[in-house]
Amino acid sequence: RHGTQGIGSWFGPVIAVWFLTLAVLGVLGIASHPTVLLALNPLHGWALLSGHGLAGFLVLGAVFLAVTGCEALYADMGHFGAKPIRRIWFFLVFPALLLNYYGQGALLLDRPAGSITDPFFQLAPAWTIYPLIALASMATVIASQAMISGAFSLTRQLVMLRQLPRMKIIQTSADQQGQIYIPAVNWLLMLATIGLVLGFQSSSALAAAYGIAVAMTMTITTVLAFKVAERFYWNTRAIALYALLMLALDLAFTGANLFKFGDGGWYPVLTAILVFVVIVTWSQGRKLLVAQLERGAMTLDDFCAQLRQSPPIRTPGTGVFMISGERIPQYLSQHLRRNRALPETLVLLTVIAEDLPSVPTEQQLEFSMPQPNLSRVYLNHGFMQQPDIPAALEYGRQQLGLDLGSGELSYYLGRETLIPTLAVAGMALWRERLFAFLSNNATRATAFYRLPPKDVVELGFQLEI
């Protein structure tokens, strides 16, 4: 929860020593039986796959774990960028892994059948076993940290894109935007890890679940990469051909791993289905909720006309009203109808999550003034950015001439209590209950948007969904 900046300075050196050790051990193994390098010829692999029928196909599932781990690179993509990851992969990680695997293969060829029980550790001289175990343990901890950071980053992006409810997100570094901590995700990961250990008992039993998870991840990544390339107007035929070649490889690995479904592969599939249901329910529920809130609500033009025709009492100060769409929210209409009073200066603010990692500061704020003392403001942010409403409004006041009046700012939020019911057309009742549970337990907008609690006014109302 305090971030990885303090211990992060050890990560690079330890991992560098780890991969260099892999390379050295691999070279020692290859030296004992250099003919293993004949495996560089892909025809040997093709002969194995094509000459042994189903058994040859199932071998893909057995050797698949040798190509896993690469997906951890994506977890750090948002922290370091593409270039450093490409360089470290091609100049250190990939060569070290290849050398080590060839070294293990050479050891298996050099020793009698059945005498090798753990080729990785048996590559090393006997006196290095305990230091090697310590180094492997440290590398494992660091690798797990990469996956935890990746889970935090992906969760934040889903929250910012409105695909998950708001969660408490703690920025643990003033310099690195990617260093965050999400308590809810951390606790879920802990419980899931303990459950996996108790359920599978051993790493070999867990391998089936891990294989299916990674194989399906690689398949989905290929499809998404094609969609992204297509979106940026790359040569569609060229990227389609490349995607088909990659899919052929990915689907082969996925198909081979599916034979392990009953041995533990069901776990990641079940987990993925549960997460998918939560995401789809939240996304669809938000759309239905916004549509219901806007049903019968006033447009901005009607609201301005009402203010001119029946001017309410104006109180000193500025009221920032958070609205989710283009219509005046129910809580503002009810507040005006019941109290017949509004702050002297009004700001109608909508926060928009752009489909971009980040939005430059000078492009985040857009506003117009439909009439004096009333501003319509849009705050745009990327899915890697945490919106800070007070800071954005102050920037608009000082740099863009946004009218925030001369008094103190008060932030008005609608706090709806959702009541699942079959009376209103929407989702299945169990999904409505799930959506209501997620909504009621989401982080308050006060904390999420960094609003000063003493200046926040919440106007509650009940709503059937």
Image (cartoon, helix red, strand yellow):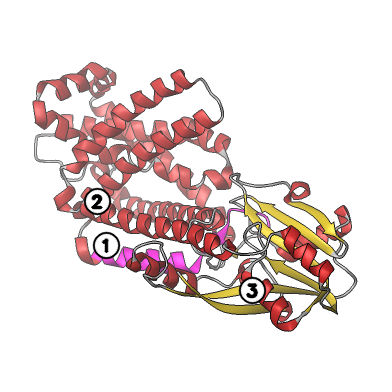
| Quadrant where the image shows the C terminus | bottom left
The residue identified by callout 1 is: 196
Left or right position of 224 against 77: left
Point out residue 42 in the picture as x, y percentages from the top left corner.
26, 19
Q: CA distance from mark 2 to mark 1?
A: 10 Å
Nearer the observer: mark 2 or 3; the answer is 3
Write down the quadrant of residue 105 in the picture: top left
**Magenta highlight range:** 174-197
Nearer to the camera, 463 or 306? 306
The residue identified by callout 2 is: 209
Q: CA distance from mark 2 to mark 3?
A: 48 Å
Residue 247 colored in magenta in the image: no
Q: CA distance from mark 3 to mark 1?
A: 46 Å
Element class at badge 2? helix
Asked if labels 3 and 2 touch by Cβ distance under 8 angstroms, the answer is: no
Point out residue 49 in the picture as x, y percentages from the top left corner.
16, 24
Q: Earlier in the sequence, mark 2 or mark 3?
A: 2
Question: Mark 1, residues whose alpha carbon is within 10 Å: few (<14), some, or many (≥20)?
Answer: some
Residue 99 seen in render: yes
